[in-house]
Image (tube, rainbow, N blue to C red):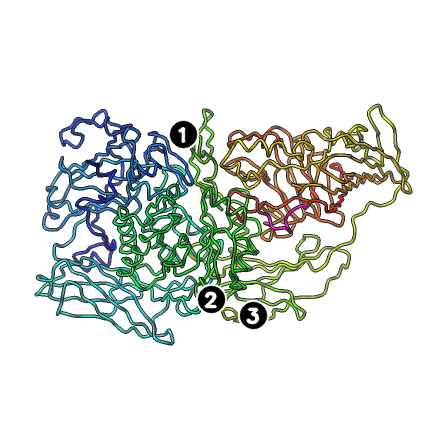
């Protein structure tokens, strides 16, 4: 006989039906004061860990069992973060205990299925004896049995929605004992193959509560609008447990929490389900820009007017519709500027304290994100409350993903899985349907397709018909109300906007074999549906390239309703070294038999919510206004859908050579949603031979929940004047002296030593002091980003091919110069180093030295293969621990991720310039740099662009250290400074998960001419 946890037909025993989680109150005073009578069972529990079920203590549920030798564990949490068992990170596979053999599915190896026994006591008040008593588990993974006072109460699986049990007949007033037997794996695990860690435990809130025996069973409210979207019709559906004792039902509507408001429904002729429609005159509407909430209160009374029970909920008046292939909120087309978000905590797994979830929502709002997809499961209810209150759209996703077996008819058309998937969908809908923030239901993620999805949708529509349904895996568009696609390039996304027939690429075909479900579509299949990217802009560590190009597509084509970045937070677990230094761990760090390495780090924030540079690009590109420079002047366009920009204070700033010379607050007239107006700014520029930028900044006028007044929400900038060339000047005659190994060139106080063999600078002195004592060598390589690694992210053995790159070899072992020429131009010296290497048709460096102490370096290259970068790298003493620059900043930017970099002058410590990613890799680049200055107490080096702007980075460690490191603790300050100066540096990509997938404009293409130069000059602390 199959065990319950190995049988898909058993998903619960004595488990209550799903409903919303509105709390029960017995008096108006307690309701208005929100005096909760729920008794939390969170805290420290007794715990016994077993490698498998055979190791369970005999009669572990016995109330008299001696547990003095049991451990203690925190609830909520997962047990892997508290020292038990090992977590498995797998993006699209299952742990060894879960069979993937078609003939065995579903089968869990009992010997490899850990069990955790939880126990605690609780006190039940005497007064509770008159009511029904329930025990609530917010979420438990993956399956569990509940015992009260030594008796089995029930069983549950479905680990991302609540489980409730009526324990009235199992408890007594006074002390009671609760025992929970949790199985890490169950047949439900097959439906929970999301891209995340496999962990186990009681990880959401546990509490007991009481309700009247004849009270409110559930309620459901929704509204429609009249043709003008002004007046609403509130549909009320209130179900009672019994109406034999209930004489009267009242419904109240208030604009303020803690007030009862006006009575909008009063009735005494009752039934088990009471359905009514109430007209509400011109209510304030809910949308993400104005999240107006009302409060509905339901009171039932007995025949003498006494309150039997009160329940209430917040409510937002809004509608969701699809018309003419557009996604409408309250009749208005909107665009999702969204992000996928896992519920993740690096210290407790899937348990998030309320403060951390609030921090997430604050970060999301601060960075102009307007929508969340709950990837890939229902979240803690607190998340939806926050989105209701602060204005975020939500796609609520069912806990169904069978990535590793989705092509094996799981769930597919197999009736064995129907009950389980329908239950998961329905429980989500019944719990969450009263939230206005939820604008779409999702049937799951990457679970293949089959008739079970049609059944899921049909059953869910019996519970809620006010929202569209989403499912990306519906490749024939039979159940999904939107065309949802993953990871299109901007070009392919535009083809959907133009209603073209689409194809899949060779790379997508390969990815289909590995993990994807890409498919071609005929225009007739999707022309009546909105198009969205449920996942795009894969933010795997140093990534999120060409993000702006995607949003341009969303804003260009009416049928596009936006997309959701993958994803919000890195799923890396925190661990400490013997030296007590915390670092981030990923797949393979726990001696797992199989894993998917560092693919868990896809966030725009780190696991501890440190902001990654990519999030600044998100903020800039998602901002809700733009300013365009047109013939008549600057035009401000409001990108909002419902409101003006009156909550912003706009300032105009003029910068000359990076310095602010003028700043003033602009008087902006009201600009309606989707409209534009001309704004006037000063036009005169006094100095015609300097670099001038006009910058517009939008800041909050008032404090709000997520940011204080003065917080910058967006900006635009324009370079309205460039300066002339930075070519070096003519001076006195420069001296050239042959040395044993090459040349010594003296120009004024500057002495530059060249090595004839490699044609490179090996030493620089200024006023007799050694400034540089390491070669200034060519740099064609970068420590691979995750996207650079490509398939090696999943097949580490392929890393050898990447490390065998000709560009890495040329950087590690500089080529010999085939020609080393010395010429004079006037009094200046020109030294030319030429190279004959297989990777280039032409590779040449020209050095110009004058007597004023200027050194100009020019590089000319024609590669035979696409390049990674073209620049120089060298090493300075750690005395040069300060850096200043004029260019984009202050954060890291790259060729295809730089619109968020604001032109200006910046100054930082060298040790603060790198960015720490979970897996050490290329980082810290600054783009479009006019000049950079490296400073020591007694000396400084200035590098100035000449015609073409530069890229640079500085690290307090060597490139080889960065290359070899696999974890953050392996990166240490090495007592030196690495300086990288590039004329060209390719983008970071991000269209495809873990693949470079660069747009052509962000590549360094073979057979193209690359030519750039910069000028170095030097000074000491006397300013000379």
Q: Are marks 2 and 1 in contact (CB under 8 Å)?
A: no
The x, y position of residue 138, in whole percent, is: 27, 46
Q: Main secondary structure of the magenta part?
A: loop
- Badge 3: residue crowd in 10 Å (few <14, some 14–19, many ≥20): some
Q: Are marks 2 and 3 in contact (CB under 8 Å)?
A: no
The residue that label 1 is drawn on is 592
Q: Is residue 883 magenta?
A: no
Along the polypeptide, which appears first: circle 2 or circle 1? 1
Q: Is residue 706 left or right of residue 9?
A: right
Q: Is residue 1003 magenta?
A: yes
- Badge 2: residue crowd in 10 Å (few <14, some 14–19, many ≥20): some
Compared with residue 138, is residue 242 higher up or lower down, i.e. above or below? below
Q: Is residue 121 left or right of residue 102?
A: left
* Segment tinted magenta in the rendering: 998-1005
Compared with residue 787, is residue 396 higher up or lower down, i.e. above or below? below
Cα distance in 3D space between marks 2 and 3: 13 Å
The x, y position of residue 495, in whole percent, is: 54, 60
Q: Nearer the viewer, mark 3 or mark 1?
A: 1
The residue lying toward the viewer, choosing from 987 and 572, is 987
Secondary structure type for disc 3: strand
Residue occupying the far bottom of the picture: 227
Along the polypeptide, which appears first: circle 2 or circle 3? 2
The residue lying toward the viewer, choosing from 271 and 293, is 271
Compared with residue 338, is residue 51 higher up or lower down, i.e. above or below? above
The residue that label 3 is drawn on is 676
Cα distance in 3D space between marks 2 and 1: 49 Å
The x, y position of residue 453, in whole percent, is: 33, 54
The residue that label 2 is drawn on is 641
Q: Are marks 3 and 1 in contact (CB under 8 Å)?
A: no
């Amino acid at each position: 006989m199959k065990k319950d946890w190995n049988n898909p037909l058993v998903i619960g025993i004595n488990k209550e039906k799903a409903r919303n989680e509105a709390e029960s109150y017995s008096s108006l005073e307690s309701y208005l004061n929100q005096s909760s009578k729920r008794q939390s069972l969170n805290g420290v529990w007794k715990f016994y860990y077993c490698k498998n079920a055979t190791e369970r203590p005999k009669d572990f549920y016995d109330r008299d069992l001696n547990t003095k030798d049991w451990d203690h564990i925190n609830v909520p949490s997962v047990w892997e973060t508290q020292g038990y068992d090992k977590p498995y990170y797998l993006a699209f596979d299952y742990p060894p205990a879960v069979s993937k053999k078609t003939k065995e599915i579903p089968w869990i190896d009992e010997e490899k299925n850990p069990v955790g026994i939880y126990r605690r006591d609780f006190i039940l008040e005497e007064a509770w004896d008159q009511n029904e008593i329930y025990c609530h588990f917010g979420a438990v993974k993956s399956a569990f049995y509940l015992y009260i006072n030594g008796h089995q109460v029930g069983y549950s699986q479905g680990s991302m929605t609540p489980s409730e049990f009526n324990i009235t007949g199992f408890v007594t007033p006074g002390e009671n004992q609760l025992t929970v037997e949790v199985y890490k794996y169950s047949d439900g695990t097959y439906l929970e193959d999301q891209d995340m860690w496999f962990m186990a435990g009681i990880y959401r809130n546990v509490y007991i509560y009481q309700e009247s025996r004849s009270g409110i069973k559930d309620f459901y409210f929704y509204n429609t609008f009249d043709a003008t979207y002004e007046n609403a019709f509130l549909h009320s559906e209130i179900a009672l447990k019994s109406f034999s004792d209930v004489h009267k039902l009242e419904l109240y509507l208030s604009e303020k929490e803690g007030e009862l408001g006006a009575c909008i429904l009063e009735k005494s002729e009752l039934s088990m389900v009471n359905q009514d429609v109430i007209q509400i005159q011109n209510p304030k509407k809910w949308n993400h820009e104005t999240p107006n909430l009302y409060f509905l209160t339901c009171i039932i009374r007995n025949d003498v007017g006494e309150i039997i029970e009160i329940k209430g909920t917040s409510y937002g008046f809004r509608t969701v519709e699809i018309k003419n292939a557009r996604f409408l909120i309250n009749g208005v087309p909107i665009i999702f500027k969204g992000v996928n978000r896992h519920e993740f905590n690096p210290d407790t797994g899937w348990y998030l304290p309320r403060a951390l979830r609030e921090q997430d929502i604050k970060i999301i709002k601060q960075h102009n994100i307007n929508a969340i997809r709950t990837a890939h499961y229902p979240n803690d209810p607190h998340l939806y409350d926050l989105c209701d209150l602060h204005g975020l759209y939500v796609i609520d996703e069912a806990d169904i993903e069978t990535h590793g077996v989705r092509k094996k008819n799981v769930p597919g058309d197999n009736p064995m899985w129907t009950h389980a998937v329908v239950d998961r969908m329905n429980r989500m809908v019944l719990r969450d349907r009263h939230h206005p923030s939820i604008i779409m239901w999702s049937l799951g993620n990457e679970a293949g397709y089959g008739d079970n999805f049609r059944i899921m949708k049909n059953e869910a529509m019996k519970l809620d018909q006010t929202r569209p349904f989403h499912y990306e895996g519906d490749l024939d568009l039979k159940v999904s109300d939107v065309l949802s696609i993953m990871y299109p390039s901007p070009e392919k996304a535009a083809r959907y906007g133009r209603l073209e027939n689409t194809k899949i690429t060779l790379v997508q075909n390969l990815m289909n074999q590995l993990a994807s479900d890409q498919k071609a579509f005929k225009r007739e299949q999707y022309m009546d549906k909105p198009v969205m990217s449920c996942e795009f802009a894969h933010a795997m560590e140093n990534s999120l390239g060409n993000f702006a190009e995607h949003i341009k597509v969303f804003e260009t084509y009416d049928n596009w309703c936006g997309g959701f970045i993958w994803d919000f937070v890195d799923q890396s677990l925190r661990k400490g070294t013997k030296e007590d230094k915390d670092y981030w761990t990923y797949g393979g760090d726990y001696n797992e038999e199989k894993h998917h390495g560092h693919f868990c780090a896809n966030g725009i924030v780190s696991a501890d919510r440190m902001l990654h540079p990519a999030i600044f690009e998100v903020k800039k590109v998602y901002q809700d206004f733009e300013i365009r420079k047109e013939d008549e002047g600057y035009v401000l366009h409001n990108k909002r859908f419902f409101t003006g920009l009156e909550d912003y204070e706009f300032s105009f700033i003029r910068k000359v050579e990076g310095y602010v010379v003028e700043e003033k607050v602009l008087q902006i007239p009201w600009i309606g949603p989707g409209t534009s107006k001309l704004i006037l700014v000063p036009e005169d520029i006094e100095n015609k031979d300097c670099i001038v930028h006009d910058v517009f900044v939008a800041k909050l006028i008032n404090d709000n929940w997520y940011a204080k007044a003065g917080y910058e929400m967006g900006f635009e900038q324009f370079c309205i004047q460039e300066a002339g060339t930075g070519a070096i000047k003519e001076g006195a005659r420069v001296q050239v002296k042959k040395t044993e190994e090459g040349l010594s060139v003296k120009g004024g106080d500057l002495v530059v030593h060249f090595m004839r063999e490699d044609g490179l600078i090996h030493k620089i002195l200024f006023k007799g002091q050694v400034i540089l004592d390491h070669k200034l060598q060519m740099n064609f390589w970068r420590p691979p980003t995750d996207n650079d690694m490509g398939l090696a992210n999943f097949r580490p053995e392929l890393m050898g091919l990447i490390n065998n790159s000709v560009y890495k070899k040329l950087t590690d072992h500089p080529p010999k110069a085939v020609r080393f020429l010395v010429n004079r131009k006037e009094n200046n010296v020109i030294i030319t180093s030429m190279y004959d290497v297989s990777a280039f048709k032409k590779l040449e460096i020209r050095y110009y030295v004058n007597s004023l102490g200027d050194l100009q370096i020019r590089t000319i290259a024609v590669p035979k293969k696409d390049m990674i970068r073209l620049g120089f790298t060298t090493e300075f003493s750690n005395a040069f621990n300060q850096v200043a620059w004029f260019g984009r900043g202050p954060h890291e930017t790259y060729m295809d991720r730089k619109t968020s970099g604001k032109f200006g002058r910046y100054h930082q410590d060298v040790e603060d310039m790198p960015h720490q990613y979970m897996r050490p890799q290329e980082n810290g680049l600054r783009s479009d740099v006019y000049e950079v200055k490296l400073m020591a107490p007694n000396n400084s080096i200035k590098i100035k662009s000449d015609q073409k702007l530069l890229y640079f980075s500085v690290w307090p460690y060597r490139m080889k250290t960065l290359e070899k490191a696999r974890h953050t603790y392996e990166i240490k300050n090495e007592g030196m400074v690495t300086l990288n100066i590039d004329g060209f540096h390719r983008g970071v990509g991000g269209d495809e998960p873990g693949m470079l997938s660069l747009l052509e404009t962000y590549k360094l293409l073979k057979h193209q001419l690359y030519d750039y130069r910069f000028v170095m000059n030097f000074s000491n602390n006397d300013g000379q």
